[in-house]
Amino acid sequence: MQTTILTVDDEEMIRELLVTALSREGYRCFQAGSSEEARTVLNAAKVDLVLLDIMMPGRSGVDVLKDIKALNSEIVVLMVTAISDMETAMRCIHLGADDYILKPFDIERVLLTIRNSLEKQRLLVENREYQANLERKVEEQTGQIRMAMEELNQTYDHTLTALVRALDAREKETGSHSERVMNYTILLAEMMGIAEPELGIMARGALLHDIGKIGISDNILLKPARLDDAEWIEMKRHPQLGYDILSGIRFLKGAAEMVYAHHERFDGTGYPNRLAGSSIPLGSRIFALVDTLDAMTSDRPYRKALPFEAVTDEIKRCTGSQFDPDIARIFRSISRAQWEDAGKYRFNGR
């Protein structure tokens, strides 16, 4: 679609010069010699960019800028000003102008500024549309998951397991990661004397701990290299996304709290809320240990599975920082054979 530019200047010679140069570049051009003429054009045609003189008789360019931004904030506005009026030009930037052009101007520089400003606006619009589409997609998927879970009510176990297997497969997790950590969670919780209904809540929280990753882009989730800072910030949203998905489902409210806190650390250095000690839900403190167990004893793209002894050494080292000391003590009291039976998975080494 042809880009439309409106030139607003009380000097006809300047308007004609700009319109001639812009038309030669393929732009559709309008011109106005006053704020009233400019308003007429803006009301009658879709304008993408305005070249706006600051100093005009009657209503100034500053007033016209305010009118334009009130009419359509996405119209690019470039202020045309003499060097003696730079203070006003900077004020216009704060009011929403995209850039300014100094008189007397070089027409090639004017064209370059126009191209750069239009490209910047195009990228901003594309980014907003991308974010809106992503949020809508997450909202739609969240709604679908909630509806399915509510309808299934007490017969949801097999469906949840199938869903989690699909999520694990999407992330190329080793084997049945989510099911193993659920079984490890049940074993450790039982050894701590936890019974139903709390035990079932913890089991569901462990099974669904990474469901929030449904809202994370594949470009980030499956990236083979280290995430950059912006990507890591996006990845850290998955506990919140998981909580948002589950908290609206009556029988998963308790699991939602555990999912929300499953990346917190005992010393308060985790995320998303830097919870510490007993302020972290008990299920999340249990999960921290069993997730480490499964992560270390499973093959990863960057290393082979580690032996069970490496896990116990790591838990000793991180007790009090990453892990709750009382739960870590009970974890270490459980034999390798018990863990293997629970997870239906054999660790490396003897």
Image: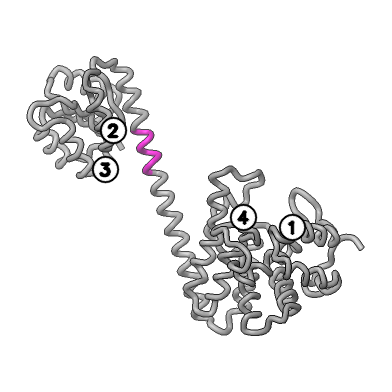
State which region is magenta: 118-125
Tag 4–tag 2 contact (CB < 8 Å): no
Residue type of the residue flagged with mark 3:
Ser
Q: Nearer the viewer, mark 1 or mark 3?
A: 1
Q: Residue at x 77, y 61 (%)?
A: 315
Say which element carries label 3: loop
Q: CA distance from mark 4 to mark 1?
A: 13 Å
Residue type of the residue flagged with mark 4:
Thr
Per the rendering, the mark at residue 278 is none
Percent across and percent down for residue 57 are 8, 26
Q: CA distance from mark 2 to mark 1?
A: 52 Å
Could you tell which of marks 2 and 3 lies nearer the N-terminus? 3
Q: CA distance from mark 2 to mark 3?
A: 13 Å
Per the rendering, the mark at residue 93 is 2
Is 78 contained in the magenta span? no
Residue type of the residue flagged with mark 2:
Ile
Percent across and percent down for residue 236 are 56, 54
Quarter of the image with the C terminus is bottom right
Residues 150 and 83: in front is: 83
Quarter of the image with the N terminus is top left
Say which element carries label 2: helix
Q: CA distance from mark 4 to mark 3?
A: 41 Å
Write down the residue under mark 4: 269
Tag 4–tag 1 contact (CB < 8 Å): no
Give above or below for 55 relative to 131: above
Q: Nearer the viewer, mark 4 or mark 2?
A: 4
Classed neighbour count for the residue bearing mark 1: other residues with Cα under 10 Å, few (<14), some (14–19), many (≥20): some
Give above or below for 10 relative to 122: above
Write down the residue under mark 3: 73
Could you tell which of marks 4 and 1 lies nearer the N-terminus? 4
